[in-house]
Image (tube, rainbow, N blue to C red):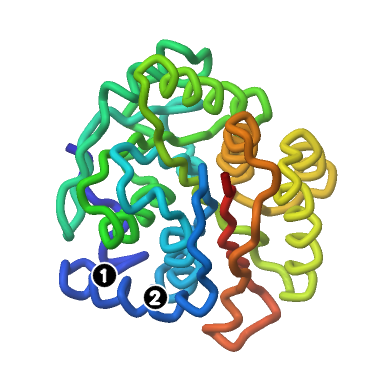
Amino acid sequence: MRKPAAAGGFYPGEKEAIEKLVAECMEKARPHIKERNCFAGVSPHAGFIYSGVPAAATFLSIKELKDAKTVVIVGPNHTGLGGLVSLSREDWELPIGVFKNDVEFGEEMVKNANFLKPEEEAHRMEHSIEVQLPFLHAVNPSAKIVPISMMDQSLEGANDVANALLAAEKNLGREAVLVASSDFSHYVPSEMAEKADKEAMGHILGLDAEGFQKEVRAKNWSICGYGPISVAMLYAKAKGSKKALEVMYTNSGEVTGDYSQVVAYASIVFPR
């Protein structure tokens, strides 16, 4: 059992408080929502007071999440612990309940991967996947999860995860929904953040994973989950998606009032 590492910090530590805050985020997100059939989405992973509304927007925008049996959640590795691309095979416990792991689906992915390996240490103290789960619980508490942490966020690593996901779907005869966990620009003035992030989103919305990866490195964009976002682009494009859609974009200055050093957040979906 993977125990909570971010409860009481990124989000409240008690069930009732979590459910109340998630409901408030979802209510604020609703004006931005046009529910769609989607293969995947991008959701931010900061403290809920900062990024909860765009996270809620992603989960509310994807029709398939309501009935999904399996949700693959791919996040960046912030801690430096564990392997390069790490699959958790444990169930995950949060104050709101236990999320069952789809071990069969994860093991099928590993069989078809070169980078992806079963490994728990990368997940122990990492928040980027955990903070998605209260939003998943709100829309579909019975969904099973496949948590994947990426320390290697290269195009090769992203291709490996996307291809393994496609192979698992084919071999098991069932589809999953993919959630890529990422924030956008970090600790820059809001104008600078928006300029860089809109440029990045040009690649993301066009499903241009290769161009996105090149520009992340060339322009030193501080998008922490560029690997998971690349997985979403590659996977959705392979499934037949033609263009991603921006649901909403915001930054921490909207909460703090300080726009001189912001972290930016985007909700993006990949329609069928």
Q: What is the tally of numbered marks visible in this picture?
A: 2
Mark sitting earlier along the chain (1/2): 1
Q: Which quadrant does the C terminus fall into?
A: top right
Residue at the right extreme of this rendering: 218
User: Residue 180: x, y in percent?
Assistant: 51, 46
User: Residue 217: x, y in percent?
Assistant: 78, 41
User: Residue 140: x, y in percent?
Assistant: 27, 53
Three-letter amino acid code of the residue under disc 1 = Pro
Q: Which residue is mark 2?
A: 25
Horizontal side, residue 30 vs residue 185: left or right: left
Q: Residue at x 40, y 14 (%)?
A: 171
Horizontal side, residue 270 vs residue 191: left or right: left
User: Residue 62: x, y in percent?
Assistant: 46, 55
Q: Which residue is mark 1?
A: 12
Q: Which quadrant does the N terminus fall into?
A: top left
Q: Residue at x 34, y 45 (%)?
A: 125
Q: Secondary structure at mark 2?
A: helix
Three-letter amino acid code of the residue under disc 2 = Cys
Q: Which class describes the residues within 10 Å of circle 1: few (<14), some (14-19), or many (20+)?
A: some
Q: Residue at x 51, y 70 (%)?
A: 33
Q: Residue at x 42, y 20 (%)?
A: 168
